[in-house]
Image: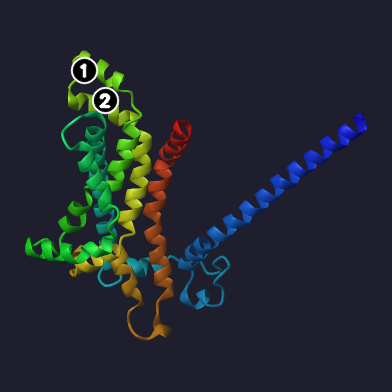
Amino acid sequence: MVTARTASSEAGRIRKVASRTGMHLFLILASLVAIAPVFIMVSGSLKPITELFVNSWGLPQEFTLNNYERLLNYNSGMILHSFLNSVFISSVTTVLQLTVASMAGFAFSKYEFRGKNFLFMMFLLTMMVPGELLLTPQFIIFSNIGWLNSYEVQIIPAIANTFAMFMCRQFMDSIPNEMLEAARVDGAGHWRIYTQMILPTSVPTLGALGILQFLSKWNDYLYPRIMITKVFYKPIMVILPTLTEGGDTSGTPYDLILAGCTLVVIPMMIVFFCLQNKFLDSVTLGSVKG
């Protein structure tokens, strides 16, 4: 009987090891599939165009930064200027979005006023409308008020983000009202409660939202493509595809395109690595509360 029990235990251990090994192999394969395009992009940006076609998968045999130098000098520094435009627009928009969303979430969560639920429901209904349907009326409105070809048209309309408001309210609903009442009894005002209690508690949620909103604004193409026609105000996501324009596909500067794609990825990686702990904290917090 002891032998049978030992054999059963050994079989269970073997199954567990096989299952774990299979899962690890699957994760390694999935990681390689995800990393391969990034590797080709980065390594290709460090190769001359002549090597790119004969050694597209391998490491650079002739390492060069000339692609980046040519890219930054392309069309009198247009790429560099558009890159800085994207950094400015995405950063300012994200900060303002989080500010407005945290304030709105605080108000909708912790204050009572007439029509609160109806107003919040109207906000949520706007999420059901595809953004593409709003481009025509937005273009007409911004054309009439003179906002086309400006930084304002790329920042201000995006400040009030319904998704961010919703996430902030959902999180702030979990903050005990008794804690806020105790602060009011001690003489804390609305602003002090918001800055010293609500914001520090909401850091994980705001960090996760910061990543999502920054990436969303950074990757935006259609909206600025329609609203902006002057090169001076265009973000890099609108400028980068113009590298392929020219009619003759044989002359497409793939080396510059790969360098541009690598350059575009860098800010997104920086934002993610700086806020990844907050993002993971928000996921863990949500699972615990669930």
Residue 162: x and y, percent? 27, 47
Residue at 27% from the left image edge and 60% from the top image edge: 131
Residue 171: x and y, percent? 35, 34
Real-space CA distance between mark 2 and mark 1, rounded to the nearest whole angstrom: 12 Å
Residue at 15% from the left image edge and 34% from the top image edge: 114
State how the image is colored: rainbow
Badge number at residue 196? 2
Q: For the residue marked with disc 1, what is the amino acid?
A: Arg
Q: Nearer the viewer, residue 96 or 157?
A: 157
- Of all residues, the one furthest to the left in this rendering is 145
Residue at 22% from the left image edge and 33% from the top image edge: 107
Badge number at residue 94? none
Image quadrant assignment for residue 185: top left
Badges 2 and 1: C-beta atoms under 8 Å apart? no
* Number of numbered discs visible in the structure rendering: 2
Q: For the residue marked with disc 2, what is the amino acid?
A: Gln
Badge number at residue 184? 1
| Relative to 286, 157 lies left or right | left
